Image: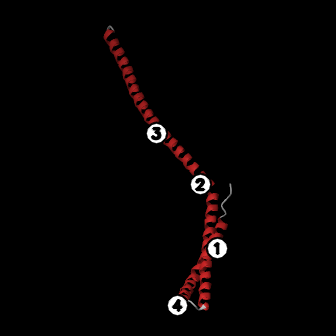
Amino acid sequence: MSSVDTDQIKTDISSNAVKIQALITQFPSILTDFKKNYVLSNMSPTDQTYKNFLSTSKNQVVESTAKIFAINNDIQQQLNTLYTNTLPLDTNVKREKEQNEKLTSELNQVKRGISGSEIMIKDYKTTYTRQYVVNCTMLIGIFLVGYLMKKIYTIKT
């Protein structure tokens, strides 16, 4: 798996930004010259000087457009490289998200199981306490009946 070189990406971005900024500053004057030479060339179609100026201006516009196209291609290649380099990371993130969902589901089941177990323990404690009270009452009752039977059936002397 290739790693993503963030320093190279930052350098490429700043390089493209400088190129784009240079074109932004140059293009208005190139366009103004082209407009002026186009008008002059159409006003004097026989004058070769104006045609040469128009041709030069047209070449500058074409060069600027070609530079923009080249920068666009560079950016596309950098995006494709970045996509290729981050694809394994994306795959790992998706796999970890699926694992997280699975573990979260299991955790929720365990928590529900713990809640169910706690309820069962509480129910058994209640049942045990009731049975303990019943047993103690029966024991006291047996001793009381035994004592009463002894008192009743014992001959007084």
Which residue matches tag 4?
43
Give the residue type at disc 3: Arg
Residue closest to the eye, 29 or 129: 29
How many labels, in total? 4
Residue closest to the eye, 81 or 132: 81
Taking the image as drawn, is residue 17 in sight? no
Front of the two marks 2 and 4:
4
Q: Secondary structure at mark 3?
A: helix
The answer to whether residue 157 is left or right of residue 87 is: left
Which residue matches tag 1?
15
Front of the two marks 1 and 3:
1
Q: Earlier in the sequence, mark 2 or mark 4?
A: 4
Q: CA distance from mark 2 to mark 4?
A: 61 Å
Q: Secondary structure at mark 1?
A: helix
Please give the label number shown on residue 135: none
Residue closest to the eye, 122 or 114: 114
Q: CA distance from mark 1 to mark 4?
A: 42 Å
Q: Position of residue 153 (x, y in %)?
A: 32, 9
Give the residue type at disc 4: Met
Res. 48 image quadrant: bottom right
Count neighbours of disc 1 (C-alpha within 10 A) and say few if under 14, some if 14 to 19, many if 20 or more.
few
